[in-house]
Structure formats: structure tokens, C-alpha cells
Amino acid sequence: MHADGVLIELGAIVVVLGLLGRLAERIGLSPIPLYLLGGLAFGQGGLLPLVTATEFIEVGAEIGVVLLLLTLGLEYTPSELLGNLRKQAPVAVLDLLVNAAPGVVAALLMGGGPVAALAFGGITAVSSSGIIAKSLVDLERLGNRETPIILSILVLEDLAMAVYLPVLTAALAGATAAAGATSAALGLAALAVVFALALRWGEAVSRIIFTGNREILLLCILGFALLVAGVAERVQISAAVGAFLVGIALSGRTAEGARDLLEPLRDLFAAVFFVFFGLQTDPSTLPAVALPALALAVWGIATKVLTGWYAAGRAGIGTRGRVRAGMTLVARGEFSIVIAGLLLAAGVAVDLAPLAVCYVLILAVLGPIAARAADPVGRLLVRWQDTRVLRRSTPP
């Protein structure tokens, strides 16, 4: 009976995802917002709450994030990654300060206290690697000039999380500053080791993994990526960063074979990830915090657009690319939900948790829409700039 229940629920979810995907295709929209809203229907308080398949969906969601970042990493070489990280390091400071500010201010204004402010700063600061990766794939922008800039910002944010999460966990537990600093130092050390291994021995790993047998190649690549992602997560580094570094490390025939083999798996588990995101939200808690969450979301959109615009501008990218960079970064997601969960588990500012979830859900839905709207917005902005130049150059 238990197995039958799991299969029925999984079958229903996959069928609904397929129908939502067809609807999104018909109306010319990214399927991500519909997947997220579909997840609400299967979660607690939804129309058809899951009973037996929740654990499978949770594991599938983690695999989805790993596959999304792994396939993104396959598009870039270690030298490209290092070059962009060096160039965008100053942007990381602006990114974290500007985008954390809305959360910090909102938490303090609502009486959350300094620990809640620290948590909310993280919720508003970090974009969703999973949602943005899927958007870039859906919109076929992997070859765009601004895409390496976007990925550099995402990687820098995820790297910052390796320091931030241990500190936040210590603060929520009431630990001393020294304990938080020790946890952060351990996370940074582990991160440096993983990074060095991926970049230094990537070619050797590629040669060991490669085989002409597609089945064996798929098993080796997927197993290696999951293993590295799991180890990275265990040592307080994002699993997404671990998977991305595996993709960066793989090269040559191994990378080419991996792209074709992983694409269908990536699309399936990515959809599961977005459903799981919606599952964690109880719709009944959202109406009471909808207005403040919407105000915070508007502020959060503005700060992310500013970050992307500035970062792309530093790289010499034109107006349309700068608009795409900023609007693609709008989505918040997995890290923000993790931080909100830590707040709930610690019993700190529990009344602010629905605000955090509503805020993330709004931007998780609006993020892919904003990314798709970036091209027409960019064209309008370029037209407006050209009109201004023409007026200035035309004698009265």
C-alpha cells in the first residue's frame, strides 16, 4: 500500500508538471512560476497535500539543484571561472551589502532583533542558483556575454554562504563569537581544498571518468557529482558550489558526453526542485503578510537589478546585457528558504518566518518572468537612450 501510494502521488505530480509545462509553452512563459505554484497545491494546506511522496520529492529536489549547477559548470573552463571571480570580487561586497540591507531593515522595523536581522539579511541577499540556472537554459542565454558575470555573482554569493551559515547557526544557538568564527574558518578551509582539487586535477579526473559506453559514463559523472556535492554540503559548503566545480573540472570528450546525457535528467529533477519549493509553503499563512512581503520584494528587485547592471557595466557590456544581468538575478530561492527554516527551528522571530517565505515565493515566481522580460525592457531603454542622444545633437 505504501509503495502504491508513492507511485500514485509521483505519477500525479509528473502529469501535472507536464500539463503545466505545456500551458507555459502555449502562452510563451517559463514553466518555473507554474511549477512553483503547482507545488503549493501539493503542500500543507494545499488542494491535494502529499502523504507518502514528500521524502522522495525532497531528495529529488536536491538532485535537481546539483544537476542544474553541474550542467552550467560544463559550459566554462577553470581559467574563465577564475578570471571572472577576480574581476567580480569587488562586486561581491556591493552585492551582499546592498541586497542584505532590505532584509536587515525590515527585520528591525518589525521588532525582530539583531539575530533576526542577520537572518533576514541573508534571505534578501542571495539569489537562487537553481532558478536562475534553469532560466538561463530555458532562454538559451548560456552563450551571452553577461552570463559569465551572472554566474560569477552566484558563485561568489554561494561562497559567502560558506562563511555566513556557520556564523548564523552559532548566533541562533546563542554560541559565542569565537565559536562562530571557528565554524566560518573551517568552512573556508574546506572550500579552498575543494576548489583547488577541482581546478588542479580536473583534467586527470576527466580522463579517468571518460568511456565510450553512455550508460557507464552517465553513472560515473552523476555519481561523482553527487558525491562531491554531498561532501561539500557536509563541510558547510553549498552543494550547488560543489556541483558547479565538478562541471568546471570536467573537460574535453567527458564534458561533451555529459551535456547530452544529463539534459533529460536535469529537466526532470529541476521540475521536482520547483515543486518541492512550493511544498514548503502553507498557502494559508501568506495573505496576512502579502503586502509587507510585496513591498520588500519590490525593494529586493531594485537592489538586484542595480547589482547586475553595475557588474555587467564593469565588464564593458552594453545596455541590453546590463539589463539582462540585473533582471536575471532577481529570483530568490533555496538558500533563503534554508535560512527561514533555521529561524523556525531555533524558535527565533517565528512570527517573521511567514514573511520570509512569502517574500521568497514572490521573487521565485517573478524572477523567471523578469528574466524573460529583460530583452524587451532592454530594447525600450536603448531606444530611449538613442532618442535622448538624437535630441541633444539636433539643433533647436
Image (tube, rainbow, N blue to C red):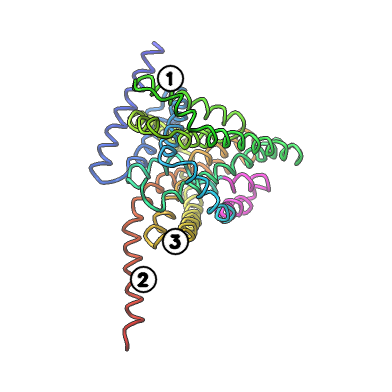
Mark closer to the chain start, 1 or 2: 1
Relative side of 270 to 336, left or right: left
Residue 316 shows which numbered tag?
3
- Figure quadrant of the C terminus: bottom left
Query: Residue 289: x and y, percent?
Result: 50, 47
Crowding at mark 3 (Cα within 10 Å: few <14, some 14-19, many 20+): few
Badge 2 marks a residue whose secondary structure is helix
- Figure quadrant of the N terminus: top left
The kind of residue on which mark 2 rests is Gln
Mark closer to the chain start, 3 or 2: 3
Q: Nearer the viewer, residue 23 or 228?
A: 228
Q: Mark 1, mark 2: which one is toward the viewer?
A: 2
CA gap, disc 1 and disc 2: 56 Å
The residue pinned by badge 1 equals: 52
Mark closer to the chain start, 1 or 3: 1
Relative side of 98 to 139, left or right: right
Q: Which residues are magenta?
A: 95-122
Q: Is residue 108 magenta?
A: yes
Work out whether 319 lies above or below 97: below
CA gap, disc 3 and disc 2: 17 Å
Q: Mark 3, mark 2: which one is toward the viewer?
A: 3
Q: Mark 1, mark 3: which one is toward the viewer?
A: 3
Badge 3 marks a residue whose secondary structure is loop
Relative side of 180 to 127, left or right: right
Badge 1 marks a residue whose secondary structure is loop
The residue pinned by badge 2 equals: 385
* Residue 288 visible (yes or no): no
**Quarter residue 266 falls in:** top left
* Residue 131 visible (yes or no): yes
